[in-house]
Image (spheres, grey):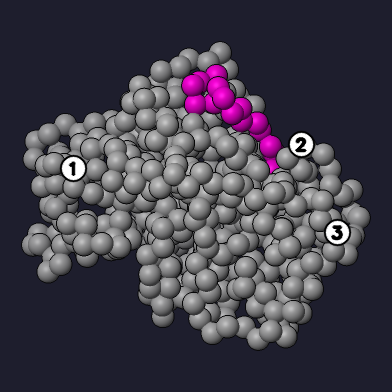
């Protein structure tokens, strides 16, 4: 049984009039307190990235059929995971495994395995799609972050299964899942680094929770990761998480051309179109005008395919500060002094990236730590539940009006939940899971918010 992890990064959302933001170069775009009405400048649009079609095709093949990740466990062990939580086999073992761990349904029969897993001889191989393919409104979407996966539970159950059969499980780095879909992946990667490096300074290995970003926004950015700490072309730091799949650094270095091709494939991904009733053209027009007045200081709108990524100081956006505080100069130095950071240096930003909102409807929950279930609640802080449980992944579980996920709102976090339910409830009182901040939409009227939502459905 080898080690498992997922993938990096996060997401936040809309409207920061009068905020001081910085461009990729770190230059202030607008002074704090200054109010601008539609500060759009066509000169700020960057030319779209030209994709190498042959490389993209090779990257697609590598992701779906190549040696991404590593051999995780024998297939026999995977199929018998139910023994950890049940005394008799479920009537549908593959469905029970998907439900317990939040894995997405595969797009093909896939030998009965979930998305992100595949048969490799007598073993099961795991790849990026375990976290970077999610079920959205009843369909599995490649590039959508998996908002239900509980990797910590999966690894713990694999350990329990090994012990029950008399085997000593390996000792993987701590894979902390704060709630389904959000884990401290960067902290785990840093912990891996400290196993082979001894820097002369302290390094945080608990960085804060984040969900997986929408892959289709990669081509819109100049900075990656929830805090903009990495340059958009930094493929090596994206490769680093593969170390936890059992891949060695020597193997990654050998496969670097394939990972470069994989990144090229990611640049071709497009956001899924809004699948519900189309909003009225009048509402979209009003929402577009409001968005341009209120939001484009931070966020790109539909006039640019690509812009420099804006990084908003944590004090301005006010969202949970854990990641922006914990991933600082020492942590950056550790990454930059390795092969993974040698070509594309990281930097400590002290803030969060204002992300592309293309296909935002399909990337719920929101903020970098997935602490808000709908876009409506992003724009109205009074509608953010403190404790909630996501209901499901079907089309009926999607909230078309509020744009996001239907949830069960609770008055408190459950006491002494079962191991399988420990991450089922999102508790925003936990460190790193806060849903505060980004209050810029609170001043809008309900009608104005509805118009902005109508516009965002079209991006």
* Residue at figure coordinates x 38%, y 73% from the top left: 138
* Residue at figure coordinates x 25%, y 62% from the top left: 108
> To which residue does mark 1 refer?
120
| Magenta span includes 8 | no
Disc 3 is placed on an element classified as loop
Disc 2 is placed on an element classified as loop
Q: Decide: is 122 above or below 343.
A: below
| Magenta span includes 342 | yes
* Residue at figure coordinates x 62%, y 36% from the top left: 231
Cα separation between marks 2 and 1: 45 Å
Residue 307: percent from the left, percent from the top? 71, 50
> To which residue does mark 3 refer?
39
Q: Does the image show residue 75?
A: yes
Residue 95: percent from the left, percent from the top? 22, 65
Residue 417: percent from the left, percent from the top? 33, 59
Residue 295 quadrant = bottom right
> To which residue does mark 2 refer?
25
């Amino acid at each position: 049984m080898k080690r498992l992890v997922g993938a990096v990064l996060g997401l936040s959302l809309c409207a920061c009039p009068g905020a001081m933001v910085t461009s990729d170069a770190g230059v202030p775009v607008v002074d704090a307190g200054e109010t601008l009405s539609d500060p759009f400048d066509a000169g700020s649009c960057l030319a779209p990235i030209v994709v190498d079609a042959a490389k993209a095709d090779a990257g697609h093949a590598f992701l779906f059929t190549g040696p991404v990740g590593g051999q995780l466990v024998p297939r026999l062990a995977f199929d018998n995971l139910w023994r950890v939580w049940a005394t008799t086999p479920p009537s549908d073992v593959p469905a029970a495994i998907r439900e317990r761990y939040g894995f997405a349904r595969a797009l093909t029969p896939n030998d009965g395995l979930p998305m992100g897993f595949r048969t490799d001889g007598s073993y099961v191989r795991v790849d990026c799609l375990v976290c970077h393919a999610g079920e959205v409104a009843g369909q599995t979407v490649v590039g959508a972050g998996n908002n239900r996966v509980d990797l910590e539970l999966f690894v713990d159950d694999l350990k329990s299964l090994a012990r029950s059969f008399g085997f000593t499980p390996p000792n993987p780095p701590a894979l902390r899942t704060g709630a389904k879909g959000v884990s401290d992946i960067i902290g785990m990667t840093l912990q891996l680094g400290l196993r082979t490096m001894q820097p002369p300074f302290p390094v945080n290995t608990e960085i804060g929770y984040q969900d997986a970003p929408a892959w289709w926004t990669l081509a819109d950015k100049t900075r990656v990761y929830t805090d903009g700490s990495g340059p958009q072309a930094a493929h090596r730091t994206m490769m680093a998480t593969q170390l936890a799949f059992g891949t060695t650094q020597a193997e990654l270095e050998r496969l670097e051309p394939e990972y470069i091709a994989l990144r090229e494939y990611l640049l071709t991904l497009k956001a899924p179109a809004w699948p519900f009733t189309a909003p009225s053209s009048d509402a979209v027009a009003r929402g577009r005008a409001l968005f341009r007045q209120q939001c484009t200081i931070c966020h790109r709108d539909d006039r640019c395919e690509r812009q420099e990524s804006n990084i908003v100081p944590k004090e301005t956006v006010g969202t949970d500060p854990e990641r922006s505080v914990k991933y600082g100069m020492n942590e950056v130095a550790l990454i930059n002094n390795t092969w993974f950071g040698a070509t594309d240096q990281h930097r400590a930003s002290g803030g969060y990236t204002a992300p592309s909102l293309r296909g935002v409807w399909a990337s719920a929950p929101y903020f970098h730590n997935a602490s808000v279930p709908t876009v409506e609640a992003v724009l109205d802080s009074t509608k953010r539940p403190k404790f909630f449980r996501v209901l499901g992944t079907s089309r009926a579980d999607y909230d078309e009006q509020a744009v996001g996920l239907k949830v069960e709102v609770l008055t408190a976090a459950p006491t002494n939940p079962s191991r399988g339910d420990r991450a089922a409830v999102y508790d925003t009182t936990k460190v790193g899971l806060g849903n505060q901040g980004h209050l810029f939409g609170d001043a809008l009227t309900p009608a104005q918010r509805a118009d902005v939502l109508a516009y965002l459905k079209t991006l």
